[in-house]
Amino acid sequence: MSHEDFPTERPAVVTCGLPYANGDLHIGHLRTYVGGDIYSRALKRLGQRTAFVSGSDMHGTPVAVNAAEEGVTPEEFALRHHEQYEETFPKFDVDFDNYGHTDDETNVETTQEIVRTLEAEGYVYEKEIPVAYDPDADQWLPDRFVEGTCPYCGEHARGDECDEGCGRHLEPGEIEDPVSTITGNPAEYREREHKFFAVSDLQEYLAAFIDRLEGTSNAQNQPREWIEGELQDWCITRDMDWGVDYPGDDDLVLYVWVDAPIEYISSTKQYTDRVGADVFDWEEAWRAIDGSDEDDERDAGSGGEIVHIIGRDIIQHHTVFWPAMLRAAGYAEPRAVMASGFITLEGKGFSTSRDRAVWADEYLEEGFRPDLLRYYLATNGGFQQDVDFSWGRFRERVNNELVGTVGNFVYRSLLFAAREFGGAPDVDLSEDVGDRIDEAIEAFEAGVNEYSVREVGESAVRLAQFGNEYIQRNEPWKLDDDDPAKARVIRDCVQIAKAVAVLFEPVTPEAAENIWDDLGEDGDVHAVGVEAALEAPAGSFDEPTELFEKIPEERVEELNEKLEARVAEATADDGADESEDAGAGADGDSSDAGPAADLEPLADERIGFDDFQDLDIRVGEVVAAEGVEGADKLAKLTVDIGLEERQIVAGIKQLHDVESLPGTKIVVVANLEKAELFGVESNGMLLAAGEEADLLTTHGDAKPGTKIR
């Protein structure tokens, strides 16, 4: 990779976290895939040679468990979902150059080849460990076949992850009080020999890697606690039948997180096989010049520009385990990791069990075009920020921005040009308008190089806004036909419309194509570079079509009623699971995992006013903030409460950008007894709302130390 601005001479590979072949897709899942598609299109627009690849994650215990419940083989179960994803992504104009799956021959061969290399390089060793075993079922219990208590935080956990507590990755044998999910009986630990990847041997390399990694700040900062702490080696085998066999040992399969990211390489290989190495050479993109440990800088600079676009709950896998594996096997390291925030529905988490979701197929069946959702997901907050979807907010942004700004400008400009001049007047472009288009191109390029999907989209919207102001200010409809200013203004507006088509194509490809056709342009709007934004319009064209349609208010009411009815029906079912998700199960990527869906009931037991008065609640201001080492959810805050500074530990690390907290006003319970969390003293408690830890603050400018009454 390089650290040069895009475009570079090296090939780029853009990947999205693999959707786990275990369920239907809803719009929460689409955030990373739409983001990846936009980013890869924008790179290509800059002239960057780019492959956009992904695939379905077919292996792992959830697939095996659910397949058994349905009475089908894991392969049948996973392939059904894979085929569904293959059909769904193109409907949202998510245009992968190659979309494979982890059980295909290419990935099996590539995975086993890489594991053999890890062995040959001395990075794999055998170790006897305790593994959960169900004596009644006479079966070993890997990952989600076992549940119990997290050894780190004491919460209920799955065998591979503390999903209800600290969120920590759990190795086989770590979970306490194990219970078999097959029989519901207590499990027992038995010694079993497994293979381990010596990640700890690469700690020095990983420390340097994370310093040069680009992308979103959460992906750069979150892994440091693992890399700079006591880095644990990684058990890479499981006692299962479903998965990629460990080379030379048919009794074990590889842990899903070994073969899943390798699909990125395999999918790129398949793309090369299809188009030829002269178009895109997978080895040029993925192979390191030298896989040795002797020259970090040389190795870091080899290979292509690899950009991973994922949900933030799989940052650890993509910034610790995956680059370590690539390094040890002689492959190129990622240039950047872009990790998205969570997505919620009307402020609550998606719940597939309660049918509390906007399903991908449902969205299309309601008659909405993919461009509308793509724009909403891309520009409604920064990529790493949490995003809430509601039909009301969706309508507002479509009507105000897509219809009112972009659609309004393009339609009125091209309609006036067609009626008055039969197309674009044959006059020169105004210098100031050319400069403004240049600024939009620069903003687009900056969005790509700053890994901001939002800026890529907004560069075109701001240009259309300028166009509206420009045509309104110059009022060409009031000018005489023989006034040169009339032709000049319309020529400028047509050029702005063409530039909007070019710059907005990554976000709204269908609308861009419609503008291109209305302009009578030759060629393919999806293939032109940013320089086309300033190339003279084709000339003559007919009256245009409307780009977007307004969403009436009654449609929102109708959609909300449908959602509420579905949730009520699903909740009434006694078998409905109370757990929440909003996630794209992409390699375990619940990138949208959100807060609990229901409000807690009001407490029946009342307290007296005097009891309330005993609480010393103060306004505080965060002075400093950092993650607690070894704890996935805990952050250590230094808080100014007026009379002194306090250290407070809070479970907000995965819910907030900790580095941005200094200067934030919060509300603190100051007279709570001191506590110790993960060996760190906490002297007070901050107040926050809901599972998303919405920090309580003050409406005005109350000073630190001000008492809450």
Image (cartoon, rainbow, N blue to C red):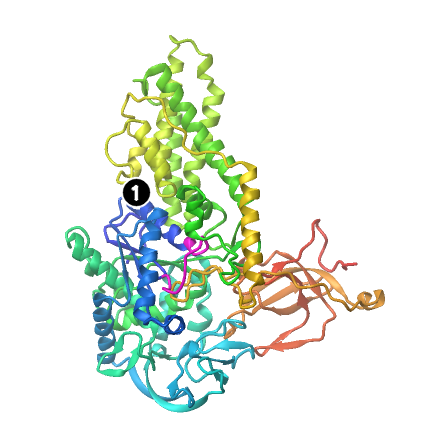
Q: Is residue 16 left or right of residue 691?
A: left
- Please tell me whether residue 452 belongs to the stretch shown in magenta: no
Main SS class of the magenta portion in the image:
loop
Q: Is residue 686 left or right of residue 65?
A: right
Please determine whether, in this image, residue 379 is positioned above or below residue 467.
below
Residue 698, image x and y in percent?
A: 69, 53
The answer, for residue 205, to whether it is visible in the render is no
Which residue is more in the foreground, 332 or 56?
56
Q: Which residue is drawn at the image coordinates 35% and 34% (left, top)?
A: 501
Residue 502, image x and y in percent?
A: 33, 36
The answer, for residue 480, to whether it is visible in the render is yes
- Please tell me whether residue 24 belongs to the stretch shown in magenta: yes
Quarter in which the N terminus is drawn: bottom left
Residue 366, image x and y in percent?
A: 45, 44
Which residue is more in the foreground, 623 or 364?
364
Please determine whether, in this image, residue 145 is positioned above or below residue 685.
below
Secondary structure type for disc 1: helix
Please determine whether, in this image, residue 511 is positioned above or below residue 146.
above
Which residue is more in the foreground, 341 or 25?
25
Q: Which residue is drawn at the image coordinates 46% and 87% (left, top)?
A: 187
Give the amino acid type for the residue marked by disc 1 in the picture.
Arg
Please determine whether, in this image, residue 416 is positioned above or below residue 698.
above
Residue 647, image x and y in percent?
A: 64, 69
Residue designated by label 1: 45
Q: Is residue 86 left or right of residue 694?
A: left
Q: Which residues are magenta?
A: 19-31
